Amino acid sequence: MRNDREMKVKKGLDVRARRVIAYIVLILISFLCLFWFYVLFINATRSHAELTKGFTPIPGSNLWINWKNLSAGRAASALPIWYGLFNSFFISTLSAALCTYFSTMTAYAIHAYEFKLKKFMFTFILMIMMIPTQVTALGFLQLVGKMKLDDSFIPLIIPSIAAPVTFFYMKQYMESALPLSLIEAARIDGSGEFRTFNSIVIPLMKPAIAVQAIFTFVSSWNNYFTPALILHTDRKKTLPILIAQLRSTDWLKFDMGQVYAMIVFSILPIIVIYMILSKHIVQGVAMGSVKG
């Protein structure tokens, strides 16, 4: 009896020790992740002269001045930041919607149908996932030029339909959350394929769609490489391009306070989108990784 009690006490102490260690590690990781956001917001409240003196954890009083100078165009050149916000939001929202919908549809086709080249198509899509964007950039720009879509949002939105990474995640999620018997039951009841997909599959896939919508939105929002090659008109440029222009201004007119204010302005919409969809993230990631 004593040995059993001693074993239970030891097990209890081991569990408590593991929990304490886990909490300490999680607190440390959370601090490392959030500290840089704190630094960003602190620096946005300070002037250029204060920033050159080094970092301080105490907020400054220049946030409104930085924003006023930025919005009034007192940098090296007037930046259309509100146009940039609208452009980034428009491109990112449509990209996220098209990417998640058509990637889910492609994953559904691979998951629910049997055909000869099924395994080959799945492998081929995964092979495309390994090709970096920079490798195909030259050919993509030539195609955009021949189609006369230069300085347009279309080349930044339509290609998001083909997203191998999103497809792979959706396929793995369907393995765990979408039984084929449910699809067969819908077919027996006379439901058409599009109705089955939109009325049954999409609602079941909401957690995964929310997760990938966030990832796609953030990826499109932060994308600088492709938009910088395609967009040339100032009022069509996205926020990352405008931030790069603000950072590359004449050093005599360069204001680091405005740069930090611009960066804060650019990440606030991402934080709002994340807060709206965050309740689905844990469920979506957990379910998607069951058979990953």
Image (cartoon, helix red, strand yellow):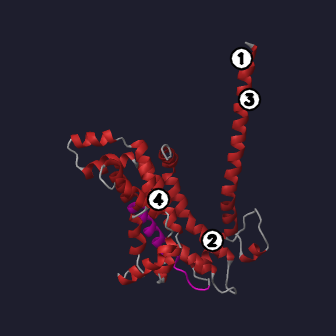
**Toward the viewer: 6 or 245?**
6
Amino acid carrying mark 1 in the image: Asp
Residue corresponding to mark 3: 13
In primary-sequence order, the first of circles 4 and 2 is 4
In primary-sequence order, the first of circles 1 and 4 is 1
Q: Are marks 2 and 3 in contact (CB under 8 Å)?
A: no
Which secondary structure type mostly characterizes the magenta part of the structure? helix
Residue corresponding to mark 1: 4
In primary-sequence order, the first of circles 2 and 3 is 3
Asked if residue 96 is among those painted magenta in the image, a careful observer would answer yes
**Toward the viewer: 59 or 288?**
288
Q: CA distance from mark 3 to mark 4?
A: 43 Å
Q: Nearer the viewer, mark 3 or mark 4?
A: 4
Picture coordinates of residue 201, whole percent (x, y):
34, 47
Q: Quick one: SS at disc 1?
A: helix
Q: Quick one: SS at disc 2?
A: helix
Question: Which stretch did the figure color magenta?
Answer: 76-98
Q: Quick one: SS at disc 3?
A: helix
Amino acid carrying mark 3 in the image: Leu
Residue corresponding to mark 4: 165
In primary-sequence order, the first of circles 1 and 2 is 1
